[in-house]
Amino acid sequence: MTAETNLWSWWQNALAGNLGPMHEGQPEQGYYRTRFKGGQWEPVAIWLDDAGGWLAMRGERMVDAADAWNFCRTHSVSYEAYQKAIEGAGWDDEPPAPAMGHNLPSDPFEALKLEYQAEAEQATAFMKTPITTQDQADKAAIWAKRLTAIKTKAESLHKVEKQPHLDGGRAVDDKWRDLKSDPDTLAKKLKAHVTPFLKEQERLEKERLQGEREEAERKRREAEELAAKADASDTDAQVEAERLQREADEQEHAAQATKTQAGRTGARVSLRTFVSALITDYDKALKALGNHPEMKALVETLANRAIRAGVELDGVQRFEEQRAA
């Protein structure tokens, strides 16, 4: 390895979105983060010591560099983000871990209830201001994922507790109902909260794509006009025409849509199309579906089913809306 070798180059390129070749057990110097499944992100630093050996630190403990690399290599972070996390200030795109302390109740219900209350208090305060940054959108998505995980755990614990008490199942259902539904409701509110931001990002992306396409078309027309007017011996004009054509091709390549989303893998929230029926003429809809005793309510149900299946009906329009999900 020469003195001029930049040991940081792989990590610097990764920060810019350009992941280079990576090999298991062969670290690259830099700052990263990793986590155990369902846990909080931990900062990771990997470096080559003066003796030519690889060292790594995960959080505040030394770990095997090759093993740490295998789990953190796709999660590079800036030095500033690493330093903030190592000092205990967390990550900008991650909701703060609830302060639960060490004296949690032994009762799983009470412990999970406290966990939800801690999450709910912070999430509710977070939703008092609109989302204006990608980091805030990511937090909302991850928070929704954590709340959904609480709901899932509540459902699992509920099932375990209920099994021996089938005869008294109604009382158990009443006990767990709020803890099952409230996290899910709050998760949906968080997704609704992030929807305006995602819609605005999508609008801006559409404007960018339109501008890129128009600029590409303009340059292509200029290139074609210049090429058509240029004499065969006019090399300067031909070179200019070729340059414009290359720029048009590059502009066309830039006009590729990027998906508007928030969160991270496993807790991703993005705009999705939700399809439902919009009934405009109940008489025509009823005629199309036949005489059914439940009339309008059932017509709406059947119309939704038909629309989602791609079947067109007289008096029914396909209605689409986007919500964070």
Image (cartoon, rainbow, N blue to C red):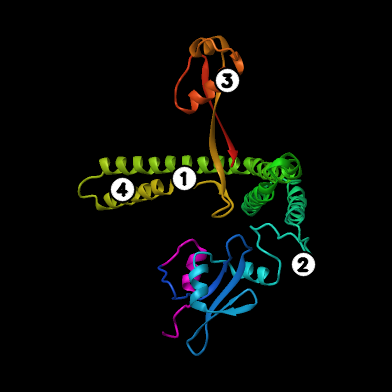
Q: Nearer the viewer, residue 260 or 297?
A: 297
Disc 1 residue type? Ala
Q: Which residues are magenta?
A: 1-20
Q: Is residue 132 visible?
A: no
Q: Position of residue 156 (x, y in %)?
A: 64, 50
Q: Earlier in the sequence, mark 3 or mark 2?
A: 2
Q: Is residue 8 magenta?
A: yes
Q: Earlier in the sequence, mark 2 or mark 4?
A: 2
Q: Nearer the viewer, residue 51 or 200?
A: 51
Could you tell me which quadrant the N terminus lies in?
bottom left
How far separated are the C-alphas under marks 3 and 2?
Answer: 52 Å
Task: Tell me whether circle 3 and circle 2 mark residues in contact (CB < 8 Å).
Answer: no
Foreground mark, 2 or 4, reads 2
How far separated are the C-alphas under marks 2 and 1?
Answer: 47 Å
Disc 4 residue type? Ala
Q: Position of residue 147 (x, y in %)?
A: 67, 50
- Residue on which the image places disc 1: 257
Disc 3 residue type? Glu
Q: Is residue 18 magenta?
A: yes
Foreground mark, 1 or 3, reads 3
Disc 2 residue type? His
Q: Specify the label residue 241 is tagged with.
A: 4
* Element type at mark 4: helix
Q: Is residue 26 above or below residue 189?
A: below
Q: Specify the label residue 300 is tagged with.
A: 3
